[in-house]
Image: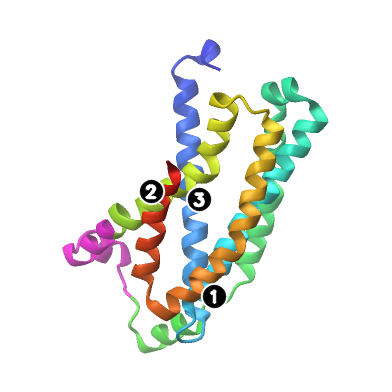
Amino acid sequence: GYEQIGIAAPLLILLLRLIQGLALGGEYGGAATYVAEHAPKGQRGFYTSFIQTTATLGLFVSLLVILGTRSAVGEAAFSQWGWRIPFLASAILVGISIWMRLRLNESPEFEKMKAEGTISRAPYAEVFLKWGNMKLVLLAILSFLMAQGAIWWCAFSYTQIFLERFMKLPGVWANLFLMGATLLSIPLYVFFGWLSDRIGRKPVLILGMVLSVVAVF
């Protein structure tokens, strides 16, 4: 805590959060690319939508674990040390993730590029040092990726903070509300993924962002 190590305490939390965010981003981006490269033509939106449903289902299960831990140890103990239990338990999932990755084969699309010799020999240099490519990366990050990130964390993380700290709702009830909202959202990812195959990604993304701006208020 701050009382023991001063400013290092919040800086360490920030550092660990950044590492966690990079790990999650890598997992999600890698999974989306892998599934997209295996999806039939014209069905990439539908197939990759299931990644989002499993990510949301993971959030639901994590809320369930937190709720169970809270109930088992009590609110006071949960605030002091109990919150560490779900984090430690997640190490099992990390192990499963590594095992799965070691057993995956490359996608047919990647193997085809490899056979044709069209794979970049210096991918990092091509992305970060060529302005034409870097411009696309910056455009993606500064437009829909930032917007989606803000919407996701407002909806699923800040909502709980808002309910507990400002609306003074008991933590258990805040968890239950979020679990309900999470379950309701799961089929919508599949529907809008399917819709993006029919009308294009851009209209679906823009519609989602505009609706989110209104819905947040």
Q: CA distance from mark 2 to mark 1?
A: 27 Å
Q: Which label sits in the foreground, 2 or 3?
A: 2
Up-down: is 103 above or below 13?
below
Q: Quadrant of the N terminus?
A: top right
Residue 141 spot, x, y in % from top left: 32, 55
Residue 164 spot, x, y in % from top left: 60, 28
Q: Tag 2, which secondary structure?
A: helix
131 within the magenta span: yes
Q: Amino acid at mark 2?
A: Val
Q: Quadrant of the C terminus?
A: top left
Q: Which mark identifies residue 9?
A: none
State the residue position of label 2: 213
Q: Tag 1, which secondary structure?
A: helix
Q: Residue at x 47, y 57 (%)?
A: 26
Q: Amino acid at mark 1?
A: Tyr
Chain-order first, disc 2 or disc 1 = 1
How many neighbours does mark 1 have within 10 angstroms: few (below 14), some (14-19), or many (20 or more)?
A: many
Chain-order first, disc 1 or disc 3 = 3
52 within the magenta span: no
Q: Which mark identifies residue 23?
A: 3
State the residue position of label 1: 47
Span highlighted in magenta in the image: 120-139
